[in-house]
């Protein structure tokens, strides 16, 4: 046993007597109590700033593997908001400032890392120079340890170092010269949130909406359904409550879209033609950015309704198609043609489309619901059910329905079927708090009296005369392995039975590749193969956008990636850059300390006892007074930043 200090953003920091044979994961979960706010662990450092760094893949190793030659008896747990570049910078500065050790090589190392961190490094080559300097031999022990630590970070997080240089991006928002306001940094589309909120504070909703649209052409849609990563990272939220960014966006969009007054200019036609397969958030956004930039864009949509997941799957009570159509209309105003009810592969071959266009974007998403179990009518996918409810108006379901899954799609299916009069139970592998659905969706479902059976999965279907009567569930004892990989384990002895006549599977979705030409390859991981920088598939003229590429988990990510795809196509076709309108000057903020006294204007929903009986929109838009008050709560963290 030896005394160690456990530190970092953990729930139980302090000094502990620890048996060095204990594994790091055991120490982390049982002594440290995990990270604050259920944060995700990214690495562990043992023995002070130049101590051994342990990556997640090695976290089951015993502590004793890392305690030889350590300077201090500390174990530091770092979360996923730790930037390896910033950490490397800290190590070098610690050597120079705290240990007062420096020489020409150390200064050169410091200069390169500083440039990477502040965005002035221009060449990836600098990383090779840095590596050479770090590998240079030295007789000074502290310098040797610093080099070992920084080299470890560079070797294991090289992609992040490269991203700082090429994209000038620091995802955790730690390298402050690269990070704008935290909300902007957290938003995949980097929407200028403080910029539009500033216009809202001046009661100019039209300009606020124009600021949003420069990065997000589906701002009204996002005002209703965005997962709002910005609010999670809002600086004001660290001090009291975050700014209600989504509700503000919803208000400004609602006002700006009244009376069809938004007019957008575009560049003159450059004669180049682009085809987009799929009209979801990715397809529509790509069409907007390319359409404004002078391309002739045609979208092919298999469904009779344009809009993708928000239009055909997300329930009416969260977003109605009239709202989606308003922003689709603005895109059509740019000359984008949308051909609905055209199934590529059946009504027209992809090859034919490619021949007629300079570039083609595949953006058909993940629209096939995954089902497991026997091929029975009483087992259906959530995707099919949600489409039937939204597009065909289906309202009659069995009395007892079980939804399998713990994500947002499961919540959408459960809440929709419940609105049709069924008694719905959600069965998820995860405990309630660990379910992947957003807190908002889970909470909404619970308020509407959806039943939850957490920590179970389906084991048997119990029929009577070919109809389902009950299902048997077995207990799930854990869902993840120590490296946060999905790996559920069950107790086969612990089972329960519940009444059920219909089982709705919400356990995942996959892409339909049946219409692809043979020169477009699918990788061994079953995702479409494409270049991560250009989004180009193995066919020179075909690009991929949105969920289909496997990188967009939420609508705003699909929108962000679509812009990158548009930029890539524009570059490949010799364009002049993507046009999103003239630069909009953002109002200067006058420091006003009285705004500290303004309480958060809560985003309201209709009463659960009322809303659970119908498909009416549950979101209540701010009043103008509420919106103005909420807008003034923004601290304008964009000042002194890169924006
Ligand atoms: S206070 Fe305003 S600028 Fe700062 S993070 Fe929050 S929304 Fe963004």
Image (cartoon, rainbow, N blue to C red):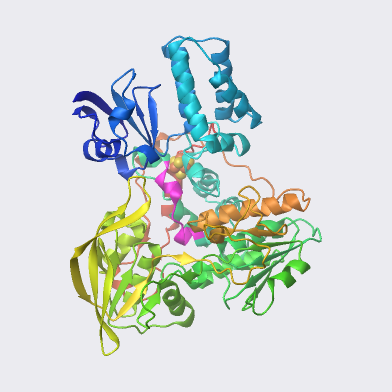
Q: Quadrant of the C terminus?
A: top right
300 w.r.t. 596: above or below = below
The residue drawn where x is 72% and y is 70% is: 351
Tell me residue 74's x, y (percent).
30, 24
Residue closest to the far right: 271
97 w.r.t. 205: above or below = above
* Nearer to me, 166 or 639: 166
Residue closest to the far bottom: 465
Q: Quadrant of the N terminus?
A: top left
The residue drawn where x is 43% and y is 34% is: 82
Tell me residue 362's x, y (percent).
63, 63
Which secondary structure class fits the magenta region best? helix
* Nearer to me, 67 or 454: 67
Assess whether residue 229 is covered by the magenta stretch. Answer: yes
Residue 322 visible (yes or no):
yes
Residue 580 visible (yes or no):
no
Tell me residue 553's x, y (percent).
48, 56
Which residues, given as a range, are shown in magenta?
A: 222-234
Assess whether residue 200 is covered by the magenta stretch. Answer: no
* Nearer to me, 353 or 615: 353
Tell me residue 405's x, y (percent).
34, 65
């Amino acid at each position: 046993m030896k005394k160690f200090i456990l530190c970092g953003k953990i729930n139980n920091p302090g000094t502990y007597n620890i048996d060095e044979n204990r594994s790091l994961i055991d120490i982390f979960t049982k002594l440290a109590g995990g990270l604050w706010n259920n944060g995700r662990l990214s690495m562990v450092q043992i023995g002070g700033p130049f101590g051994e760094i342990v990556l997640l893949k090695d976290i089951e190793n015993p502590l004793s593997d890392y305690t030889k030659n350590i300077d201090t008896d500390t174990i530091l747990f770092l979360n996923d908001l730790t930037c390896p570049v910033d950490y490397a910078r800290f190590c070098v500065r610690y050597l120079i400032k705290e240990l007062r050790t420096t020489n020409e090589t150390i200064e050169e190392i410091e200069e390169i890392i500083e440039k990477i961190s502040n965005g002035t490094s221009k060449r990836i080559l600098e990383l090779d120079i840095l590596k050479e300097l770090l590998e240079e031999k030295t007789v000074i022990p502290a310098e040797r340890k610093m080099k070992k630590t920084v080299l470890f970070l560079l070797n294991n997080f090289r992609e992040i170092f490269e991203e700082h240089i090429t994209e000038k991006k620091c995802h955790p928002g730690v390298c402050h010269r690269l990070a704008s306001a935290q909300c902007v940094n957290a938003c995949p589309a980097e929407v200028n949130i403080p910029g539009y909120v500033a216009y809202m504070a001046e009661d100019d909703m039209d300009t606020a909406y124009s600021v949003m649209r420069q990065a997000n052409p589906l701002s009204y849609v996002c005002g209703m359904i965005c997962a709002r990563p910005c609010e999670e990272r809002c600086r004001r939220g660290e001090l009291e409550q975050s700014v209600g960014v989504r509700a503000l966006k919803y208000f400004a969009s609602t006002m700006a879209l009244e009376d069809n007054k938004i007019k957008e200019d575009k560049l003159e036609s450059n004669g180049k033609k682009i085809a987009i397969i799929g009209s979801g958030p990715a397809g529509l956004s790509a069409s907007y950015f390319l359409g404004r930039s002078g391309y002739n864009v045609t979208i092919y949509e298999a469904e009779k309704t344009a809009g993708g997941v928000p239009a055909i799957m997300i329930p009416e009570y969260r977003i109605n198609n009239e709202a989606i159509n308003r922003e689709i209309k603005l895109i059509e105003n740019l000359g984008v043609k949308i051909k609905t009810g055209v199934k590529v592969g059946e009504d027209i071959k992809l090859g034919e489309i490619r021949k007629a266009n300079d570039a083609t974007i595949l953006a058909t998403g993940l629209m096939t619901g995954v089902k497991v179990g026997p091929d029975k009518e009483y087992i259906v996918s959530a995707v099919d059910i949600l489409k039937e409810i939204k597009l065909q108006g289906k309202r009659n379901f069995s009395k007892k329905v079980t939804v399998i899954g713990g994500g947002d799609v499961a919540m959408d299916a459960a809440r929709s079927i419940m609105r049709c009069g069924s008694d719905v139970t959600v069965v998820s592998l995860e405990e309630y708090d660990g379910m992947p659905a957003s807190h908002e969706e889970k909470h909404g479902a619970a308020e509407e009296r959806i039943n939850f059976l957490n920590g179970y999965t389906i084991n048997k279907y119990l029929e009577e005369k070919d109809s389902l009567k009950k299902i048997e569930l077995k207990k799930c004892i854990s869902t993840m392995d120590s490296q946060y990989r999905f790996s559920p384990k069950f107790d086969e002895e612990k089972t329960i039975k519940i009444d059920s006549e219909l089982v709705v599977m919400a356990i995942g979705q996959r892409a339909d590749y049946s219409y692809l030409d043979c020169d477009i390859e699918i990788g061994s991981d079953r995702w479409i193969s494409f270049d991560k920088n250009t989004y180009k598939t193995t066919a020179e003229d075909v690009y991929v956008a949105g969920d289909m590429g496997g990188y967009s988990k939420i609508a705003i990510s699909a929108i962000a990636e679509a812009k990158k795809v548009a930029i890539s196509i524009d570059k490949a076709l010799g364009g002049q850059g993507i046009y999103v309108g003239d630069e909009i000057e953002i109002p200067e903020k006058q420091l006003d300390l009285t705004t500290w006294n303004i309480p958060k204007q809560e985003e309201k929903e209709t009463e659960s006892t009322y809303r659970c009986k119908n498909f009416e929109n549950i979101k209540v838009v701010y009043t103008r007074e509420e919106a103005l008050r909420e807008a003034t709560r923004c601290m304008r963290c964009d000042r002194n930043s890169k924006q």
